[in-house]
Structures are given as structure tokens and as C-alpha cells.
Image (cartoon, grey):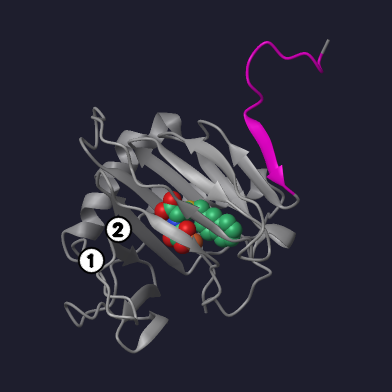
Amino acid sequence: MMQHELFAEPREPLAEGAVLLRGFCAREVESLLRELDSVTAPAPFRHMITPGGYRMSVAMTNCGPLGWVSDASGYRYSGTDPVSGAPWPAMPEGFVRLAQAAAAAAGFPAFAPDACLVNRYEPGAKLSLHQDKDEKDFRAPIVSVSLGLPATFLFGGQRRKDPVRRFRLVTGDVVVWGGPARLTYHGVSPLADGEDTLTGRYRINLTFRKAG
Ligand code: MD3
Ligand code: FE
């Protein structure tokens, strides 16, 4: 009986070390977006420039002790916002609680993120296939939280040319990537236009990392 669930399994393994927790924070989306305002007031979204000189289609900001930044000199984590010169805003309490609860649910009980990169997609915005490897320690997982418009997530392998699988991520979904999945190539397809009741024409993604 138990192996024939009537409803979709909320805990869906994507690969060894990667688990999709469908709707894990569905009831908190509104409060997470309200807490996000306390981040974007002092540290507004901005389009960073790649080391190759291109403007990223995804707008970004950060909260927590460290923030991911890109400019002509490269990708790195920085304790200060290069726009304001000030430290990044603190990680809101609800963000920290969610990241720890999701990591624990995926088998990483002591996750202590020191960086939260916030990505904002507008229709057409995308993230090309890449690895996240600017963090110091790959033993910690990355927790990713989807808010607002749905997206098609691209999940490849350990090499850029490995075949890519596609997953639809909707508001309230959380994915935990750790262990052997930590250095998997991944990306996001160009966002389709739409209207979300809370975010309008945007998709927001929070990624919690142990960067330092
Ligand atoms: C798989 N963000 O910020 S989150 C990123 O939806 C990033 O905004 C995407 O990729 C987004 O770097 C995807 C999912 C994600 C994040 C990190 C990963 C998947 C990952 C690290 C390793 C493997
Ligand atoms: Fe990434």
C-alpha cells in the first residue's frame, strides 16, 4: 500500500545527493517575500557584469556574511556590497530556519549557511549551464528555494557535455544539492512570461551556501 502513494511523493530524489522537496515552503512564500524586502531595501537587485564583459540577464543581490559578486576581475565572495560599500544585509530569520530545515530533511543536519545569493528572473532571463565552485568547502550542500513564476531547471552531470535533464520548479519548491551532486552542471532555461499573485512577472530564487 505505502509504495502506491495517491499523491506525488514530496521528497523526490533527482540524483545521488540531490533531492527535490516539492512545496516544502509553500506556506511560507508570502512571509519569505516580506523578509526579502528587508534585504532589497539596503541592497537592491542589480545586473552584475561577467568577467567576459556581458551583463547578466538575472538580477542579483545577497544577504548574510558573504555575498557572491561578479565583475571584470572575476567571480568571488565578498563581505561587502560593491554598490553601497556596506556589509550585505543580515540573513532574515525565516531564511535561516528554512535553509536548515530543508538541509536536515535531506540528510545534512548541521548546515550553517554564511551566504544567500538571491536571483531575480524576468521573462527571458536565464542562467547558462555552470558549476558552483567559488565556495571554499564542497562538503556543505547548497539549498535552493523557488518563489514566484515557474522555471525549467537544467540538471546535467559532472562534465559540461553530459546529458541534461529538465525539471519544472514552482513556487514553494526547495532543492538540496550535496554530496556527489554538489558539482553538477546546472542552469535555468529562459523564463516564460506569466503572472504570479505575489511576485508579478518575476521568479526569485534563494540559494543558501557555505562559502567561506
Ligand atoms: C546543483 N541558481 O545561483 S538553483 C546559482 O534557479 C544557480 O537561480 C539557479 O544555479 C536558480 O548558482 C539554480 C539550484 C542549484 C544551485 C546550486 C547547485 C542547483 C545546483 C549546485 C550544484 C548542483
Ligand atoms: Fe548555480
Circle 1 SS class: loop
Q: Which residues are magenta?
A: 2-15
Tell me which residue sits at (23%, 81%) in the image.
Answer: 82
Q: Earlier in the sequence, mark 1 or mark 2?
A: 1
Residue that carries the numbered disc 1 in the rendered image: 47
Between 190 and 205, which is closer to the camera in this rendering? 190
Q: Amino acid at mark 1?
A: His
Split into 4 quadrants, where in the image is the N terminus?
A: top right
Question: Residue 194 appears at what percent x and percent y?
Answer: 25, 31
Q: Relative to 212, say whether 43 is above or below.
A: above
Q: Is residue 179 left or right of residue 30?
A: right
User: Mark 2 packing: few (<14 Cα in 10 Å), some, or many (20+)?
Assistant: many
Question: Residue 77 appears at what percent x and percent y?
Answer: 41, 79
Secondary structure, magenta segment, majority class: loop
Question: Residue 63 appears at what percent x and percent y?
Answer: 34, 65
Which quadrant would residue 71 be assigned to in this image? Answer: bottom left
Q: Is residue 12 left or right of residue 86?
A: right
Tell me which residue sits at (40%, 57%) in the image.
Answer: 127
Between 156 and 181, which is closer to the camera in this rendering? 156
Q: Is residue 25 left or right of residue 54?
A: right
Ligand 1 closer than 8 Å to the CB at disc 1? no
Residue that carries the numbered disc 2 in the rendered image: 58
Between 20 and 31, which is closer to the camera in this rendering? 20
Q: Relative to 96, say whether 54 is above or below.
A: below
Ligand 1 closer than 8 Å to the CB at disc 2? yes
Q: Is residue 89 visible?
A: yes
Q: Amino acid at mark 2?
A: Val
Q: Is residue 96 visible?
A: no
Magenta span has 79? no
Circle 2 SS class: loop
Q: Is residue 90 left or right of residue 151?
A: left
Question: Residue 188 appears at what percent x and percent y?
Answer: 44, 50
